[in-house]
Image: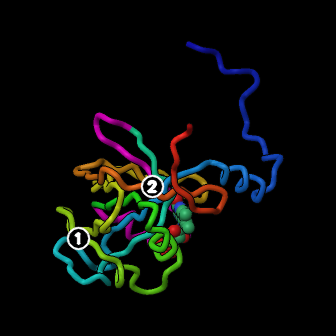
Amino acid sequence: MRAPSPHPILPLAPDFEPTHFRQALSRFATGVTVITTFGPGAAKGATLSSQFVGITASSFNSVSLTPPLVLWSLGQRASSLPLFHAGTHYVVNVLAADQADLCQRFATGQGDRFANTPYTLGQAGLPILDGALAWFECHNRSRYEEGDHVIFVGEVERCGFTQDSAPLVYQNSQFSTTHPLP
Ligand SMILES: Cc1cc2nc3c(=O)[nH]c(=O)nc-3n(C[C@H](O)[C@H](O)[C@H](O)COP(=O)(O)O)c2cc1C
């Protein structure tokens, strides 16, 4: 058995400002997703656009191939947090380069964000956005509170993708897309 360390590792106060941290993080280029689930009181079988909620998230990433797992995180202050926390399923929609308007709508839009958003309902009964580069229909497998966010791990039950569309890329507060290096 290992003896307890005479020098326990204690968390240090950061020696940088939150703004500096945000700026450093913003250099990391990400894709952009819109994650959809059921609104208050709605469940599978819902058909009205107002019965769904959706949020923009760039924190999406892969976790595991077997079983197929993905993750993303949501701020503790998001109004949709209780719905994502309690729901059994959500759909992660990966946006294409021509969907920057959806990114803004699902980050800031008031009221029904799906009203002018073309979508079809997947097998879980949740919106899959038309034109999405890829989509992942997830069982809400686990949640971890960390700092001011909650990390969601989803078990992918179904997924799909388009072959030739370009991705929407977010970096340093700007949108772009990918170009192969020469
Ligand atoms: C490009 C972009 C990426 C974002 N990524 C995240 C994210 O990963 N997690 C998060 O909590 N909010 C993220 N946001 C902010 C949320 O989309 C926004 O706060 C959202 O509307 C959730 O709050 P609500 O549930 O109150 O609507 C992002 C916003 C933008 C524009």
Q: Earlier in the sequence, mark 1 or mark 2?
A: 1
Q: Does 160 sit left or right of 101 as displayed?
A: left
Name the residue at the bottom extreme: 111
Local SS, label 2: loop
Residue under label 1, please give it: 120
Q: Is mark 1 within 8 Å of ligand 1?
A: no
The N terminus: image quadrant: top right
Tell me the distance, in whole angstroms, between the alpha carbons under discs 1 and 2: 20 Å
Residue 153's spot in the image, x, y percent?
39, 49
The reply to whether dot 1 and dot 2 touch (C-beta < 8 Å) is: no
Residue 154's spot in the image, x, y percent?
35, 50
- Identify the residue at image location x=20%, y=80%: 47
In the image, residue 24 above or below residue 115: above
Q: Amino acid at mark 1?
A: Thr
Local SS, label 1: strand
Residue under label 2, please give it: 167
In the image, residue 120 above or below residue 114: above
